[in-house]
Amino acid sequence: MTTQRTALVVDDDPDHVSMIRSLLEKAGYTVTGETDSLLAMERIEALRPDCVLLDIMMPNLDGLQLCQKIRANPDYAAIKVVIVSAKPYEFDRQRAIRFGADAYFIKPIEPRPFLARLEEVFQDTLQVRFWGVRGTLPVPGPHTVRYGGNTNCVTLHLPKGPMFVFDAGSGIKNLSDHLLAAKKFPMACKILISHPHWDHINGLPFLVPLYIKGNEFEICGANQNGISTRQMISDQMDGVYFPIRIKEFSARVYFRDIQEEQWDVGHGALVSTMLLNHPGICLGYRVDYGGRRVAYITDNELHPPEHPHHNPAYLRKLVRFVEEADMVIIDTTYTDEAYVRHAGWGHSAPRQVAELAHQARVKTLCLFHHDPDQKDADIDAKLAQTRAHLHRLGASCDCVAPAEGSVITL
Ligand SMILES: [Zn+2]
Ligand SMILES: [Zn+2]
């Protein structure tokens, strides 16, 4: 695909300038090269390029100082700033992002991923990927090939900043394989744990980037009545239940205990949490970024109005939490019929989730956390059931049941 974009490449190494120039020109960019960083601001003023690619280690004015100068001028706010450096250190990457860079690429450059990542910088899209959509227990086999048999794991990629991982069920192995193949290390990641039931944490030891030096992880979850998130993870890796202990993580791993709160994670992203209706302490998450909203709500029971435990105040609170979300990933473990037999088990069914989506004016509803006894055809039926409820309610919400491996872009 060709583009009409313009780029300024600033690097004191003329060979690098010409290499990046030829790569970008082949992709349709109009490119200007500059080997003297002191002249870069003049060039930007004259050219007003769509993007500026900056080396870090340049005499006189380094790339990070240049990045700061560009970001100090509001007239240049639309210009994408990409650092292209041989420095592979997380410290430098984080500093660059803090100074306002849109991305940090590490040399040597491989043409195809380089152009793909640069395209992502322009797209400003959010990407949600489903690595495991089942609840309770992994269920591989001939009846689960379409939706997949792995338990809860979903990622959210923003144009910049850390990757978010919602839960660490067995689907996280797929994510791990994907990250190893992509080789985009060092990486920064926030793992947001809903609660410590097995299907939400027992894949974590299989996330290989945790054992790779230079990567950085923050593992967040609710303190379970005195059991911290750190203890919850380390207890399942105590040498008895798993042979590798958390002290063998080579990445920098931080733990954070959270309750209902909201925090700014930087890069324009705001994370909010809400306590859900499920045995023990379970958190739902919401990420707001660039006018878009994604919520991850599992495990959660919404009692129907005729049930004695129906709680209108809780429903109102949850409606507010997910209000006008672009996407809500929601516990829809049972069919309406099966829910009657499983009321009080902490999970929901199509009628209730459709009502929630309707009231909250959700744009896309993703059915999630499927019962291990359900075959692919049962999930099809649950999807049809939810869509029928939404239709009856007159909701304009789009409803899908994402399969393992699927990607939705917002
Ligand atoms: Zn679960
Ligand atoms: Zn649970």
Image: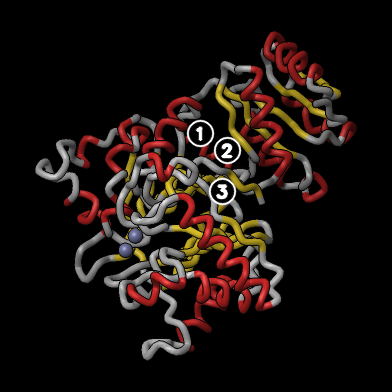
Q: Is residue 54 above or below residue 333?
A: above
Of residues 105 and 353, the one drawn nearer to the viewer in this rendering = 353
Q: Position of residue 189 (x, y in %)?
A: 44, 44
Q: Is residue 56 above or below residue 317?
A: above
| Circle 2 residues within 10 Å: few <14, some 14–19, many ≥20 | many
| Label 2: which secondary element | helix
Tell me the residue at 43%/27% (across/down): 180
Give the side of residue 86 with respect to residue 369, left or right: right
Q: Quadrant of residue 200?
A: bottom left
Q: Position of residue 328 (x, y in %)?
A: 56, 63
Q: Position of residue 198 (x, y in %)?
A: 26, 54
Q: Quadrant of the N terminus?
A: top right
Tell me the residue at 22%/35% (across/down): 248
Residue linked to disc 1: 92
Indicate the amino acid at tag 2. Answer: Ala
Q: Earlier in the sequence, mark 1 or mark 3?
A: 1
Indicate the amino acid at tag 3. Answer: Val
Of residues 153 and 262, the one drawn nearer to the viewer in this rendering = 153
Question: Label 1 to label 3, Cα distance in Å?
Answer: 27 Å
Q: Which label number is shown at residue 96?
A: 2
Q: Earlier in the sequence, mark 2 or mark 3?
A: 2
Q: Are marks 1 and 2 in contact (CB under 8 Å)?
A: yes
Residue linked to disc 3: 128
Tell me the residue at 69%/8% (across/down): 15
The answer, for residue 214, to whether it is visible in the render is: yes
